[in-house]
Image: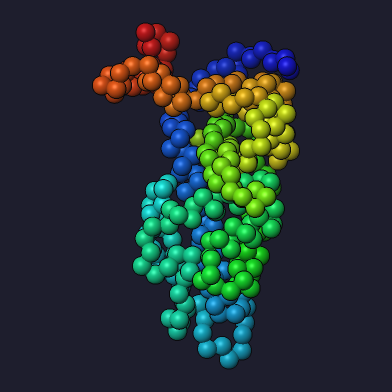
Amino acid sequence: MAKREKISEERRKLIQEFIKSNDLKTTGDIQEAIKDLFKDTIQEMLNAELTEHLGYEKNEYIENNENYRNGYSPKTVHSTEGDITLNVPRDRQGTFDPIIVEKGQKDISSIEEKIIRMYARGMSNQNIYEEMQELYGVKVSLDMVTAITDKIIPEIREWQKRQLEEQYAIVFVDATYFNVKQDGIVVKKAVYIALGVTMTGEKEILGFYIGESESAKYWTSILNEIKNRGVKDILIMCSDGLKGLKEAIGAVYPMTEFQRCIVHMIRNTLQYVSYKDRKELAQDLKQIYQATTGRSRI
């Protein structure tokens, strides 16, 4: 196991000051970041659908054109991560009917899983085409699915490879489980989500990673991928006991403090008390982990 370097007093004070001045909800933060990414992808798909309907790109000049773009209409839809407001594109003649979010449709939670899977590293272009085919089904031609996918893939690849901040105060790693096609059959796999909190308190998803196996080797490859995208330092890495992660942190980011996720620690603690006492205990624990000094925790 890599030897972890001793944390300097100056660095420890930096960590304490950040925690004191920022409200960190972990699970809620991850859900909010996923919702933003989900919204942006649906918006791109709607725009791509209108392009296919009109037969020409935005800002492309077509002589004697009888139909053209005509702004947007706001539409609020429900997802498992919360309400999302989309800008549905319109055409002048009113002949465009969106497919990915149909007229009158208010709930789009059924397509979230497929879209998030497309952003996971390890998904080939063919995998993404297959996800798109499932999303659209028999509602559109294969040529249209291909055309829309060709517009979405560059967005996905750019997002996966984008440069990150040089330093993050905290990186949360959490897992969610999705059904993934593998060798022609559907299997349930973990998709790990890395959420970074910048030194100014802004939150962004660093990446989605399909779990092959929890091991130090696996996590080292993920951390090196994050490092290669520009991350030089992480003050705190926070997760719920993922096997091999702590060892990998020591190898790639030896100055990083490792901490169990507060949300998971509280859930685990509440299992040891009767149901009727859990609410009261949760409030007591909240006073402890939100305390600003060691003395006030007593």
Q: Nearer the viewer, residue 207 or 142?
A: 142
Q: Nearer the viewer, residue 251 or 72?
A: 251
Look at the picture and state if 37 lies above or below 277: below
Q: Is residue 183 visible?
A: yes
Q: Is residue 158 visible?
A: no
Q: How many marks?
A: 0
Residue 126 at x, y percent in the picture: 69, 58
Residue 36 at x, y percent in the picture: 49, 50
Q: Quadrant of the C terminus?
A: top left
Q: Nearer the viewer, residue 119 or 69?
A: 119
Residue 157 at x, y percent in the picture: 67, 53
Query: In the picture, residue 44 is in which quadrant?
Result: bottom right
Look at the picture and state if 34 lies above or below 128: above
Q: Residue drawn 62% across and 46% down?
A: 120
Q: Residue drawn 37% across and 20% down?
A: 270
Q: Residue drawn 55% across and 49% down?
A: 116
Q: Quadrant of the N terminus?
A: top right
Residue furthest to the bottom in view is 64
Look at the picture and state if 197 lies above or below 162: above
Residue 269 at x, y percent in the picture: 41, 18
Query: In the picture, residue 163 is in which quadrant?
Result: top right
Q: Is residue 210 left or right of residue 33?
A: right
